Image (cartoon, rainbow, N blue to C red):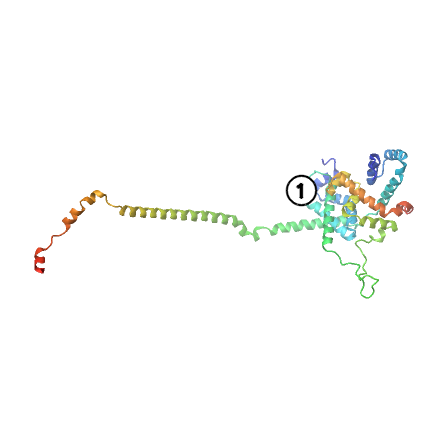
Amino acid sequence: MMTDPIFNRLREVSWRRKLTAGEEAELRAWLAEHPESLPDWEHEAALNEMLGRLPDAPLASNFTARVLQAVEREAAAGARGTEFARPRYRPWLRWLPRGAFAAIVAGAGLLAFHHHEQSLLRGQLVQSVATISDGASLPSPEILTDFDAIRVLNTPPADEQLLTLLK
Amino acid sequence: MAAEQDPDAALMLRVKQGDSGAFAHLVEKYKQPVINVIYRMLRDATEAEDVAQTVFIQVYKAAHRYEISSKFSTWLFTIARNLCLNELRRRSRHPADSMDIPHPERQDESWHQFEDKKVSSPPESMLHGELEQKIERALSDLPENQRMAITLCRQDELSYEEIAEVLGCSLSATKSLIHRGRETLKQRLKPYLNTGVWREEK
């Protein structure tokens, strides 16, 4: 690949368009100093001419009209699609967010009620345990010191006459 | 790029406002350059016209999103390139039956005798001489990116920087693609380059 900057620049320009008069003069001067590059340049120029000879692709004479008709059809189809999406087929969708909100509120309420019930039950349980604890407490040792005396006092006397008769 | 520097951008802004006349003007201006690029990529005149129509429909549908950040022609040819690549990918996923299967009774003939419309020449009215056929065939045999780069290079509306933007690669990579493609073309067309027959057929 030719690396000379002048040659490369003029070559790249020629790929896209014909050289101006000034560029042609610059090229001629450069080729005069580098005649070994002349075949390369001639091949580039020949290929430019060949590519330039390629005819335009075939195109219908009513192409623009057909494009405009297609665009109108697209616009009409788009308008119909918008109508179709109206609430006629989606009334329930409008209520969906409200229903979701109500469900969330109800759920929160149920959760709070359950929590409250649980708290009450725990409270009752604690009370029960406290009551039982109170009832099961032992008397103080001082009370027990007179226990025997009180026990004897409460014991009825023996029936001597009955015992004598039974002997 | 301001609208006053790019008259096409100014037209596109009017299309954005719903001006169908401005849109028709753009279609008229760019229909041939666009289909030239598409045809050279797809090698089928009917498909090229369909894809070209889709390009302009896409332009119209995207008008509300159009911003003057790049030249209109750059944006337009980028859409054309993308749709071409989509079509080429679709073809590669659904290849046609091989044309080379021999006929069971006549082994020297292929089974299918249909004209190869994809690669064959465009309608004869378009072609003048064997040379143009050779050029078309050599161009169609190039890799997609080189073929696209060389085809875009023939568009007066696009600078090298804009071609690079359409292709989605750097300026140096773009010039490299064009150079490599041209070197291949020169090798394929060497007999004609040397004999100068292309001058004689003018």
Q: Nearer the viewer, residue B179 or A84?
A: B179
Extreme bottom residue here?
B105
Look at the image and tell me whether residue B21 can be seen. no
Q: Nearer the viewer, residue B82 or B94?
A: B94
Look at the image and tell me whether residue B58 can be seen. yes
- The image shows residue B200 at horizontal and vertical percentages of 92, 46
Q: Is residue B200 above or below residue A165?
A: above
- Callout 1 amino acid: Arg
Measuring 61% from the left and 50% from the top, which residue is drawn there? A83
Q: Is the N terminus of chain A in the top left, top right, bottom left or bottom right quadrant? A: top right
Q: How many marks?
A: 1
Chain of residue at mark 1: B
- The image shows residue A115 at horizontal and vertical percentages of 40, 47
The answer to which quarter of the image holds residue B162 is top right
Measuring 87% from the left and 49% from the top, which residue is drawn there? B131
Q: Is the C terminus of chain A in the top left, top right, bottom left or bottom right quadrant? A: bottom left
- The residue beneath circle 1 is B65
The answer to which quarter of the image holds residue A146 is top left
Extreme front residue here?
A167
- The image shows residue B127 at horizontal and vertical percentages of 85, 51
The answer to which quarter of the image holds residue B105 is bottom right
Measuring 84% from the left and 34% from the top, which residue is drawn there? A6
